[in-house]
Every structure is written in structure tokens, then in C-alpha cells.
Amino acid sequence: MTKKRLLFAIAACLVLALLCVFGAAVAEDDQVKLSMDMSENQFTGPKEITVSITVTNGGDTELPGAVTLYYPSGKRIEEFGAPVLATGASKNWTGTWTVTESQLKEGKISFTVRYSVYDENGELKGKQKKFSKKITYVGAEPAVTINRTILPTTAQNGQEVTVTYEILNTGNVDITNVIIKENSGISSKSGTIESVKIGEKANYTFSTTMGKKDLTSAATVTYTAAGKTYTAKKESATIKYGTVKLTATLSADKKGGAPGETVKLTLKLKNSGTVDYTDVNVTDAVLGTVFSNQTVPAGETVTLEKDLTITESQDLQFIITAQNATGEPLETATGKVGIIATDPTQQIVLNVDAKADRNIVYQLPGSVRFTVTVANASTVDVKNVTVKAVDKTLYTFPLIAAGESKSFTRDVQISMDGQYQFTASCKDQLSQTLTFYSNILPIAYTMPTPVPTEAPIVTPPAPVYEKIPTDVEMPGWMTTFVSVSGTAKYIFGGVAAVLLVLLLIGAVRRIAKKKHSAAAQDHLERGSYRDYSVKPKGNKRNVVEDRLDTDTADTATAEGGEETPESTTVQDSELMAETLRRLYDKKPAEEAAEAVGEAAENAAEAVAEAAETAAEAAGNVTEEVKEAAEAVKADAKQVTETDARSFGRKMRNRKG
């Protein structure tokens, strides 16, 4: 009994020890928890799926080391990182994984997590844990549905015809490399669609031009699914040739733009028949009903417009249904118009600012200096920006970087007044021209204003003094007397000048006479006598200083013979007269006359100047003074000659 108890006790201890070890292992395993989700779990073959994994620390303590996550292939998932998870903390990763053939055969996909823990001895050790998710392999059952749309079903010569194929994947496996081969009458080239996922659809359109006979459409579609190639056919359909009385044309003002921009669609409906078309409805596969209940009268064209906001790239083709007055239905369609949605981050925005150095010109044509600034407000560089004014290119910027502004200045000859605006144009991603407008500048024309003349400097007139009127007016005779006396003073002045001249002439004459008289007297007083019996030498008579030398005289008398007193007296008188004549005749008189004449001329000139001055002041007396001056001058000359001759005669008479 004791032995049995001992064995039982030993067994119990062993079980307890195992339980402790198992509990510790469970505790370790329970500390790190994983959860995984997959986008799908049934597969017909290898396929890429989306996987989401979350790692959580479910223990009571922080994990002592980093946590890392690995793909089924054993490659570390770098995007997960190497976090150290605190108690209750989690880390998530979402990515893609391609399911392989081996995983399909195994029926599961396994990801691995690695982390560190402390063992019972307190030592750090590394652990890894795989987390698996079951997947199911099902047989590939590829299937497609082919839909075809022919527009229009009846077309006239030269009209566009479109044949659109819609490929819908109705199988359980994606299809790839879809090839559509149409009848050669429609297109000689095959259409290709890269892939169509399960439950999705894709379109491809053939376009052709109707000739003068019917067209036949028939297509063979091939595709690949689960590594195999499959083929499907679309039955043939006839496109009839005929005359269409109602034709439709669709156009857009631009190829596309950034999402949110607007495109203007224009539909023209032309009725070339003789009856009206009523109940005209226009639809589109994407837009739905575009226009309804329209009427197109016979022989007319109706234009309809619609603004379309761009949301995505799409092909538009309007289908028109109508009936004529006889109730005959009609269906036709426009050609396809593609609208492309561009990357909004590549959208071009330019701001154009214009300035002018003046807003008025005074002649036509006139010169105005414009300065245009183009600012690139977009996030992309813009090339070849052309600035124009009234379709005339003024400048081209090769490049305007994002956020940059560039300017230019140009002198422009304008031929008329008005409003001026500039445009800046460039090409966008679709190679279509974008145009941006500047502000409007008004330029006016005004007739030039005459240049203002300087105000003349006006000298104010001399003040006019008026006598204060008295009770008794001045008598008339006194007024006349005052007037005459004002003139008389100038006349008296002139007469005084003449008298002064005459006085000067008289003084000159007296001086000349006095000079000649003194010379004669001086000659007579020098020497006792002169010898007048001998012919003078050189017009000079010899003077005998004294008469004491009687002997000489007697001798001369004796030699010449005895003379009587009467004959001696006659001889003396004749000799005396000859001496006086030679002494005062000609030269002395001429010299005196010339001196008097020169003095008279100088005096006459002085009188003339005085007379002119007096004439300017006297007014009407001027001419009289000039005549008096001339008369004085003439008298002076006459006096010069007359007085000289008279003086000579008087002296001779006096001597005789």
C-alpha cells in the first residue's frame, strides 16, 4: 500500500510538473496575438490578393525586444518595421501578396512573426510564430458576355458608322489579353483589351465610313483565363445603306481639361427632308437623356448646346430617335467625341496684367507704351507663351517657370481710340490652345490743345492827372498863352544858340585882326627905315638898323647923282605902298581866313547838334533851327573870305 501511494505521489508530481511547463508555454504563446484578413479566399488559380495583419501584445508585460513580420516566402516585410510593443499595444500592416500554385495545393497561406521573451530562468530568448489562413481552390470557370452596339443601323454615303463591343466577365476568373477581330468590311485591324476582372466590363469601338452598299458586322473574341485560351463569337449584323433625312453632328469646344472644368457640347440636327421630325430625343450611354421633345422642321438645322462638367475621361456618342409627320420612326447617331480628364496638378493658370503710359492720345495714329506682365499661377512650367493684341503677336516668352512672372514693354502705334486688351496663349497637356485675357485699357483720342502763350507784360499807362476843378475856369487867352510860351521857349533857345555862334565868330575875327595889326605895327617899329630902293630878296626887305652912317649914304648919293627932294618923296611913297602890299597881301590873309573858316565850321557843327537837340524837344521848331544853322554856317564861310579881303584893302588904304 505504501508502495502504491509512493508511485501515485510520483506520478502526480510528474503531471503537475508537465502542467506547469505547458501553462508557461501557453502563457508565452498567448502574449503575442495575430489576426489576418484577405480580400478573397477562393481561387481558380494564382492571383494577387490584399492581406491585412495585426500583431498585438496580449501579455501583462512589455515585450523585451522588437517584433518583425515576414512574408510566406520568408522575406521580411520592411513596411511593418520593428516595433517594441507595450502591454496591450498593436501594430498593423496592409499589403498585397500573390497566391502561388503550391499554396493553392496546400490550402493555406502562412505569415510569420518573430519576437523575444524571457524564459523561466530569466534569460532572453527569440521566438517565432506562424499564422495561417485557409484558402480554397476551385476550378476555373471563365465566361464572358459580348454586347454589340451599331450606330446608326442605317447610314448614307459618307456617314460615320460605329460598332462598339462590350466585354463583360461573368466567370469566376479574371480574363486577360482580350482580342476582338471584326469583319474586314468594318475594320482590318483587331481591337485589344488588356484585362477584364471578375464581374467587370470593358468596351472597344470600331469606326468606319458608310459607302454605297450595306456593311456586315461579325466578331470573334479570344481571351485567356487560368492559363488557358478561350474563344467566343458574336453573330453578324447588317448595317443598311440608305438615305437619312435627319443627320446629327456632335462637337466639343475642347478636347478635355482638369476635373471640374466645363466643356461645351454642340449638337447640330439637320433635316434635309420635306417633312418635319418631331419628338426628337437625344440620349447617351454615359449621360443618359441629353435633350428631349425637340422638333426639327423640314429643310432646317437645329443647334443644341450643353455644358458638360468633366469628371473623368469618357467617349460621348449621342443617339437620336425621332419620327416624322407620317409616324415613321427614325434612329441615328453622332460620331464619337472623346473627353479627356487631365491631371489637375498639371493644370495651367496664367494671370495677365496690362498697363499703359497714357490713356489719351492727341493724334492718330498715336504712340502708346504698353507694359504686359504674365504671371504663372500654376504648379508646372509653361513653355512658349505668346502675347497678342488684336491678333498681332507682340512677344513670346520661351519659358515661364511655376510661380514666376515675366514682363515686356512695347511701343504700339494705335490707329483708333477705344478699349485695348491683351491675350496670353499656350499649349496644355492635350496640345490644345489655352487663352488667358488681360484687363481692359481704355485709350481716348482728344484734339490737341493749343500751346498756351505767355501773358504779355503790359506797362500800365502813365497816370493822367486832372486838375481839381475850381469854381472859376481859366480864361481862354491864358490857356493860349501857356501853350504859346511852351513852344516859344524852344524857339528862344535856338535863337540863343545862333547868337552864341555869331558871338564866337566875332571873337575869332577880332583875334585875327588884332594879330595882323600887331604884326604890322611890330614891323614898322623895328628899325629906323627900310631900303626900298633895292629889290627885296626872297620877298624880304633889308632893314637898315640906323642912319648914323652918313658917309655911306652920302657916298651912295654921290655915286648915283644928285636927287631932288620931290623925287625922293615919290619914290618913298611907291616903295612904301609896295612894301605894305607885299606884307599883307595873299598868304597872311589866306592863313587868317583858313583859321577863321575852321573855327566857323566847328562852331557851325556845334550849332547844328544843338539845333537838332532843340528840334527834338521843340517838335515843330526843328526845321527852322536846322535852316538857321545852315545859314549861320554859310554866313561864317562868306564872312571868312569877305573879311579877309576887306581887311587887306583897309590896311593898304590906311598906308596910302
Image: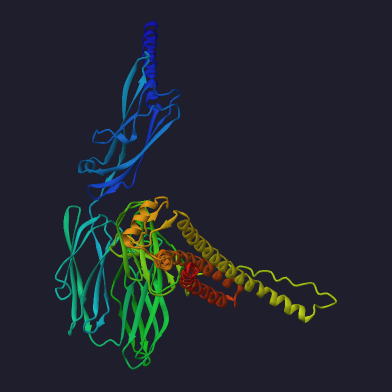
**Of residues 469 and 95, the one drawn nearer to the viewer in this rendering:** 469
Measured as percent of width and height from the top left, residue 329 is found at 34, 86
**Of residues 652 and 192, the one drawn nearer to the viewer in this rendering:** 652
531, above or below 389, in the image: above
396, above or below 486, in the image: above
Residue at screen point 32% across, 76% down: 250
Measured as percent of width and height from the top left, residue 370 is found at 39, 63
| Quarter of the rendering containing residue 255 | bottom left
Residue at screen point 25% across, 48% down: 47
Residue at the extreme top of the image, as rendered: 2
Measured as percent of width and height from the top left, residue 163 is found at 24, 73
Image quadrant containing the N terminus: top left
525, above or below 412, in the image: above
Measured as percent of width and height from the top left, residue 366 is found at 39, 71
Q: Is residue 592 visible?
A: yes
Residue at screen point 81% across, 74% down: 469
Colouring used for the render: rainbow
**Of residues 523 and 293, the one drawn nearer to the viewer in this rendering:** 523
209, above or below 651, in the image: below
